[in-house]
Image: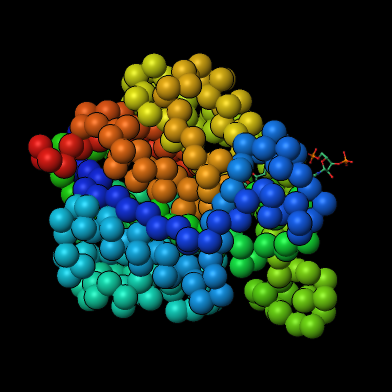
Amino acid sequence: MTNGNKRNVVIKGTGHAVPTRVLSNFDLEKMVDTSDEWIRTRTGILRRRIADEHTATSDLATEAGRLALEDGGVSPEQLDLIIVATITPDMFFPATSCLVQKNLGAWGAACYDLSAGCSGLIYGLDMAMHSITSGAYNRALIIGADCLSKITNFQDRTTCVLFGDGAGACLVEGADRAGVLASYLGADGRGWEKLLIRAGGSRHPASPATLEAGWHYIEMCGNDVFKFAVRIMVEASLKVLADAGLEPEDIDLFIPHQANIRIIESAAHRLKLKDTQVYVNVDEYGNTSAASIGIALDEAARSGRIKGGDRVLLVGFGAGLTWGAMIIEWVDKDND
Ligand code: COA
């Protein structure tokens, strides 16, 4: 949808948090039959951050959210809504967003979690935008946060080299001018088995047998996800560009989900984007799932890579299968 003529939303603040512990490709060489060379050339990843045994998703989410509030100059009590996008909640229930609310002291906020895999932050931003433009809410904190290391089999070289932990947050507020120029979400449940955790839910409750089978770990059809990712990132980006009446060259910064440098480069090439338009940090963090786009957005904003008036294109894909894209006109907070 386009969002040019009615009440809109702007991103008032961003934040991110990652664990301090670094797991390098060389560390992984000692754990599974892999090599730094294979991981670098096939994925572009050099290292990733891994949460320790005392750290859960809500801890990283809280820190990212706190920084976003600080960045936007908003106190926790002023929040109306907290959405946490995650596939690694602290526990089945209560929602991780309720734990974040407790940690922040955001007593006036309604809270829910959202499961859209690595598309989660864009799903959350889109939901918050509609909640705010409807007039029901005015300020929302959207946090994409995951600790994929907690659901990764570190004996499976086809998955364990890809993932890392982190959280990225956006503080979103109602405004009378265009902030979100276009937004688009999609899903195709026929691809549910391409990326999943098979057990632990109501289909296959956790049991000694599911544990024995390793059904509590991520399973993935890597090649199928790769092809889907390139196709859908291009399609979703072209859709929001068309909705906003923009061309790829009008985009100042393209922030794709950071899963694999080859996926990012293929999509950027098909969109005819220059290297200077594309944000990449997959080398540092690996695939942090719902956190990835939020971490990149916060890094880009804080380093001055995004300035007031810039048009930023976010695009993600993930388990579900799901996808989402959004074009944001950036607000310079200092001149707001
Ligand atoms: N180290 C060394 N060799 C590995 C390896 C590793 N970590 N992982 C797989 N291999 C091997 C495979 O066993 C295979 O060996 P074979 O040819 O003897 O069977 C070979 O490398 C090639 O495997 P393949 O799966 O074809 O590699 P690829 O180039 O497709 O890269 C992925 C694999 C997973 C990196 C890639 O498919 C990918 O990034 N997919 C998308 C994943 C993703 O984004 N998931 C999250 C979505 S949100």
Instruction: Tell me the quarter of the picture where residue 154 sits.
Output: bottom right
Image position, residue 47 (x, y; %): 59, 48
Residue drawn at (68%, 55%) of the image: 27
Image position, residue 96 (x, y; %): 43, 72
Residue drawn at (44%, 74%) of the image: 95
Instruction: Tell me the quarter of the picture where residue 148 sits.
Output: bottom right
Decide which of 129, 197 is in the foreground and name it: 197
Decide which of 267, 53 is in the foreground and name it: 53
Whether residue 6 is visible: no
Decide which of 5, 18 is in the foreground and name it: 18
Residue drawn at (53%, 24%) of the image: 268
Image position, residue 100 (x, y; %): 35, 71
Image position, residue 227 (x, y; %): 69, 34
Q: Image check: 334 left or right of 20?
A: left
Instruction: Tell me the quarter of the picture where residue 293 sits.
Output: top left
Q: Quadrant of ligand 1?
A: top right
Q: Quadrant of the N terminus?
A: top left
